[in-house]
Amino acid sequence: MTLDDLGWNAEFEREFAPYHAEGLKPARLIRDNKITYGALLADGEELEVTMSGKVYHDAETDAELPAVGDWVALDLGGEAGETMIRARLARQTCLSRKMSGRSTEEQVIAANVDVVAVVTDAGPDFSLRRMERYFAIIAKSRAKAVVLVNKADLFSEEKNSGAADAIRALNPEADIHITSAAKGTSLKVLKKYLRRGVSLTLVGSSGVGKSSIVNRILGDEYQWTDEVNETTGKGRHSTTARELFVLRGGGILIDNPGIREVHMWTDEATLRERFYDISELAEQCKFHDCKHGTDAGCAVRAALAAGKMNASRFEGFQKLEVEIEALRLSRKKRAMTGERVARREQQKKARRFTERAGRDNDHEPRWRGER
Ligand SMILES: Nc1nc2c(ncn2[C@@H]2O[C@H](COP(=O)(O)OP(=O)(O)OP(=O)(O)O)[C@@H](O)[C@H]2O)c(=O)[nH]1
Ligand SMILES: [Mg+2]
Ligand SMILES: [Zn+2]
């Protein structure tokens, strides 16, 4: 493997020159482990890395922190044997979305991507309004827009082509393909984009088949996907961190966790508040730790069955704990990095103090002598 296989180019090379002089190594981030990152080096070696305090401090917003797809300068001989991200190269493209609500913060979905493939289906996931939003963020990213109307095996040909036509009408510049990850139909069209050094990322709602498509292309069950959830009719959450795969035949695939309507950058109370009615209902469930799935005496499912509750609201409620967990992890990452910085500052201070004390001692006899 070479850097070019990972998407390296002359522009990155130029920007990296000063880091090269410092003995730092270029690497591409392939996984966000929340506290650490997975990084891929030119020789194909994969390392677990942490960001330096400087990188953390220089980032004025979360969006400026390293993200999957970013090129970084690594210090392989960091203190205590840690491999450190010393700098992040400028993003040539960047797929991100604005946080909803008051916050103006941006969340990076994938950095340095050439093609963004939005995965949807002609059935329950189909929404032209949501597709509009995807097209808007892709346009901003400067990547090429592709749409995969997946799960074609589940719907009639008319329904699939009707969905594709409606999407095409929204954005004539986008490439629209009808696919089935289950049957392996039409996934070869993706090969057309996946040339050496080209990065393609898959986005879309949870359960539309992004990981299944990645699996198909990788040709093995690299990623875990679950059977369809009997309550929601969707696949259970499987992808939790973004993952970048370098294909043997050339090209780079970036899988993503499903993009939820509820964003995870708000606070826990606000997240819970949105579903206070369901939370109250849940208190009437027979079991205290009811998962509202197959547990007996579930008040939430009873309300759902009685048509007293909107199914999509229930789905949102079910994802709530996942959202909250994600929120906690991102907080923890910030806190831990903060602690790391604080510890280092303390060490520096201690060192300065010792040095000064040493200097004072040196001076002491002379000072006495002068007196
Ligand atoms: N019938 C049919 N089922 C599919 C197809 N593609 C995926 N599935 C099923 O849909 C479910 C969800 O698929 P995943 O690939 O995990 O979906 P995902 O988009 O990666 O979901 P998240 O990781 O949660 O965002 C699984 O049970 C898949 O087997 C398809 O083309 N046809
Ligand atoms: Mg997935
Ligand atoms: Zn319940």
Image (cartoon, helix red, strand yellow):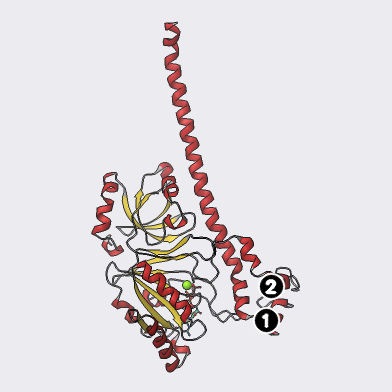
Tag on residue 333?
Answer: none
* Position in image of residue 352 (x %, y %): 45, 29
Q: Is mark 2 within 8 Å of ligand 3?
A: no
- Residue 278 horizontal side relative to residue 208, left or right: right
Residue 240, position as x, y percentages in the image? 50, 66
5 lies above or below 369: below
Ligand 3 located in image quadrant: bottom right
Q: Which amino acid type is marked by label 2?
A: Ile
Expressed as whole percent of the image width and height from the top left, the position of residue 275 reads 65, 70
Quadrant hosting residue 365: top left
- Which residue is denoted by mark 2 in the rendering? 278
Q: Which residue is pictured at 56% across the width and 82% down the height?
A: 233
Query: Which residue position is annotated with label 1?
Result: 304
Which of 162/338 is in front?
A: 162
Label 2: which secondary element: helix
Q: Quadrant of the N terminus?
A: bottom left
Q: Viewer-proximal residue, 10 or 263?
A: 263
